[in-house]
Amino acid sequence: MAVKENTAEAKTAEAKSAEAKYYVYLLLCADGSYYCGSTNDPEKRLQAHNAGRGAKYTRGRGPCTIAYLEEFSSKSEAMSREWHLKKLTHREREMLVNGSSGSRK
């Protein structure tokens, strides 16, 4: 049986894991459309989208801005929420961004 050592490196990895945050975001593109995605660094991901290195959908639709952002403690929770948001219509996404109850489950 392998024994896990309590090294400084292991403690740092555990701390990073405990602090890890995941996000689901809606981008508002310059053409008025919304793009939904997930990431662990929203600002870096926004820069990638606006530089043409993000999703193919956002290329040529910039500049994009973050219109909506949700934080999660696990990647699986974020991806599940992303899947639900991708099912929303444009109008339902607008309602979510504007604070109305527009999400369906």
Image (cartoon, helix red, strand yellow):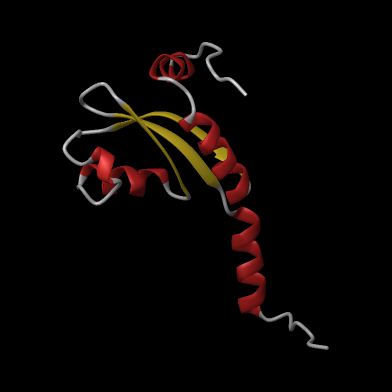
* Residue 3 x, y percent position in the rendering: 79, 86
Query: Who's the residue at 29% across and 48% down the image?
Result: 54
Q: Nearer the viewer, residue 3 or 10?
A: 3
Residue at figure coordinates x 58%, y 50% from the top left: 75
* Residue positioned most to the right: 1
Percent of width and height locating residue 27 = 35, 32
Q: Quadrant of the N terminus?
A: bottom right
Q: Residue at point 74% right, 84% down?
A: 5
Name above or below for residue 18 compared with residue 2: above
Judged from this view, the residue extending furthest toward the bottom is 1
Q: Quadrant of the C terminus?
A: top right
Whether residue 89 is situated above or below residue 86 in the rendered picture: above
Percent of width and height locating residue 96? 48, 18
Number of numbered labels in the structure image: 0
- Nearer to the camera, 89 or 37: 89
Residue at 62%, 43% in the rendered image: 77
Residue furthest toward the left?
60
Left/right placement of residue 17 relative to residue 59 reads: right
Pinpoint residue 73: horizontal percent, then vertical percent.
63, 46
